[in-house]
Image (cartoon, rainbow, N blue to C red):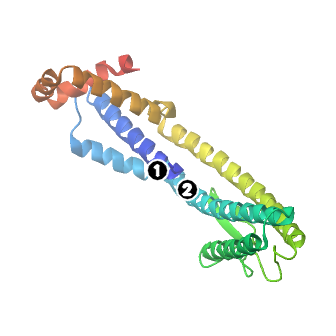
Amino acid sequence: MFEFKNVLDVTYRAYVVNGAYGGISNSNGSSTQAPASNQAVAVIRELLTGNTAAVRRNARDASTAVSIVQTFTRAIDTVAGKLTKMQELAKKAHSGVYSQVQVEEMQTQFRSLAEEINQTVSGTEYYYNKPFAADGKTISIPIGNGSKIDIFARDFRFDPQGLNIATDPRSVLSAINEAITNISEYNTYLDRQAARLRDTTAAFELEMQSAMGVDIQDFRPELAVTMADYAASLISQDKQTSLNTQANLTPDETLKLLQENNCSIY
């Protein structure tokens, strides 16, 4: 999965290079003259400490928050999946169509799944805080612009002591259903936090667009794929001509061709 910070970094660099080269070319009085590398570097460094600095800091906070919420969501999904398997075992035992030996084997699987749930709960943490364990505490995570989201702590351990699907499958099924309800409610809560993060990252994208004065739609990944496919098709049609053309072009001529064909590409 692409993280927001990674996508923003690529877009940001495209903005910087495009803006730096365009501005320097215009200042030289020629749109086809390639700028000296030291001029471009100077402008890029200035931009790095300019309007985009705050947006990038916010983006880093948002990216970190996204990763944390995704980690917690995966843990919750893992626990929910194991609870579903335990529920299926309890229902089978309660049906009365399985032998005693089979039901006892189900009990072994049931206890094993409970142990796996507790391992997942114990292994999910943030700065030594385990929000899904007994002593977990609420976590506040910065998401940029001084805002935060709170991840409330809730104990999702499953205690199999006293629960036996071989002797009392009905009680076991009741306990599992309660655990499934609790984790489903919490999953909904995490989804709301994730939705808030999506809105936040979208706002940062707009801020970056405004700071650089470039349309962010010009740097969509889909366009990069289209361009790569187009270039590959041309090369495959006539490899030797392509190589000869590249070898005979100076940097200034290459830049001129790119600028002249910029509109026709799309």
Mark 1 lies on a secondary structure that is helix
Q: Quadrant of residue 172?
A: bottom right
Marks 2 and 1, how far apart in space?
9 Å
The percent coordinates of residue 8 (x first, y second) are: 48, 46
For residue 178, side relative to residue 79 (left or right): right
Residue under numbered circle 1: 6
Mark 2 lies on a secondary structure that is helix
**Residue 30 visible:** no
Determine the residue positioned at 47% across, 46% down. 7
Determine the residue positioned at 75% across, 80% down. 134
Kind of residue at disc 1: Asn
Determine the residue positioned at 60% across, 79% down. 128
For residue 161, side relative to residue 72 (left or right): right
Q: Dot 1, how many residues are within 10 Å of its Cα: few (below 14), some (14-19), or many (20+)?
A: few
The percent coordinates of residue 242 (x first, y second) are: 17, 24
Residue under numbered circle 2: 63
Along the line of sight, which residue is nearer the eye, 229 or 36? 229
Instruction: Tell me: residue 132, above or below residue 198.
Output: below
Kind of residue at disc 2: Ser
Is mark 2 in CB contact (under 8 Å) with mark 1? Answer: yes
Q: Earlier in the sequence, mark 2 or mark 1?
A: 1
The percent coordinates of residue 222 (x first, y second) are: 46, 32
Q: Quadrant of residue 263?
A: top left
